[in-house]
């Protein structure tokens, strides 16, 4: 990494060192911070980094990201419900579609990358949204809510997204960067 930063500096490529971090992936979390130099400026290593709304952690786990997505989904649903009640959103199908759309859009962002091992964390957002919207008791089993409203389990949404990405990846030209990175795995 230091060699790459030296090359950037040599070719006068500017790096915003105040907003840049280096994320070193390893199985064990290291407590020491590693400093990298780019000319006179230093860039420090970080334990986690938020890139395009996905939190990457140095141990490779996406558990922190799943919890963050769950919180975002819960906030979105809580802010949506008063609007739906005031407008009297009409037919049941409209409520189901809106609640599903918000739950999936907020909790499953980039889930094709991180989602499958952590789907149980974000699954509750969808079920809780319906329980809150229709004033169901907290002890109502999740499967009953899914059956009653015809909800698709989030696990299937994650699998669908991952398979769609994989098909798209397979159809890419061999010179495309996502395909090159995937083949290196």
Image (cartoon, helix red, strand yellow):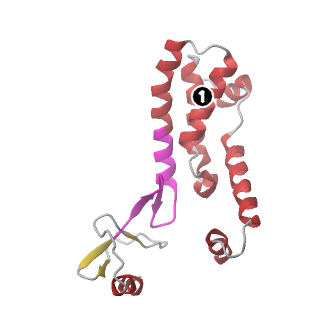
Task: Please tell me whether residue 136 belongs to the stretch shown in magenta.
Answer: no
- Quarter of the image for residue 97 reads top right
The C terminus lies in quadrant = bottom right
The N terminus lies in quadrant = bottom left
- Residue 52 lies left or right of residue 173; in this view the side is left
Magenta residue span: 45-72
Decide: is 97 above or below 27.
above
- Coordinates of residue 182 in the picture (x, y in percent): 65, 71
- Coordinates of residue 86 in the picture (x, y in percent): 49, 13
- Quarter of the image for residue 179 reads bottom right
Decide: is 69 above or below 57.
above
Residue occupying the point 70% across, 24% down: 149
Q: Residue furthest front?
A: 12
SS assignment at label 1: helix
Q: How many marks?
A: 1
Residue occupying the point 57% across, 35% down: 103
- Coordinates of residue 85 in the picture (x, y in percent): 52, 14
Decide: is 13 above or below 59.
below
Residue occupying the point 72% across, 35% down: 152
* Residue assigned mark 1: 99
- Residue 15 lies left or right of residue 102; in this view the side is left
Does residue 137 appear in this view?
Answer: no
Does residue 166 appear in this view?
Answer: yes
Q: Nearer the viewer, residue 158 or 135?
A: 158
Q: Nearer the viewer, residue 175 or 4?
A: 175
- Residue 128 lies left or right of residue 173; in this view the side is left
Residue occupying the point 72% across, 44% down: 156
């Amino acid at each position: 990494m230091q060699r790459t930063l030296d090359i950037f500096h040599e070719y006068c490529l500017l790096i915003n060192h105040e907003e840049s971090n280096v994320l070193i992936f390893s199985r064990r979390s290291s407590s020491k911070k590693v400093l990298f130099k780019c000319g006179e400026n230093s860039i420090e290593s970080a334990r986690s980094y938020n890139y395009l709304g996905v939190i990457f952690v140095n141990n490779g786990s996406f558990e922190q990201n799943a919890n963050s997505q769950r919180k975002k989904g819960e906030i979105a649903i809580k802010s949506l419900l008063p609007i739906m009640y005031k407008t009297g959103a009409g037919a049941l199908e409209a409520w189901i579609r809106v609640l599903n759309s918000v739950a999936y859009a907020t909790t499953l962002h980039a889930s094709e990358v991180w989602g499958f091992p952590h789907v149980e964390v974000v699954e509750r957002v969808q079920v809780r949204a319906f329980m809150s919207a229709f004033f169901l008791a907290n002890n109502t089993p999740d499967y009953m809510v899914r059956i009653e409203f015809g909800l698709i389990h989030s696990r299937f949404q994650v699998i669908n997204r991952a398979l769609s990405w994989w098909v798209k990846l397979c159809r890419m030209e061999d010179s495309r960067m996502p395909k090159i990175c995937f083949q290196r795995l």
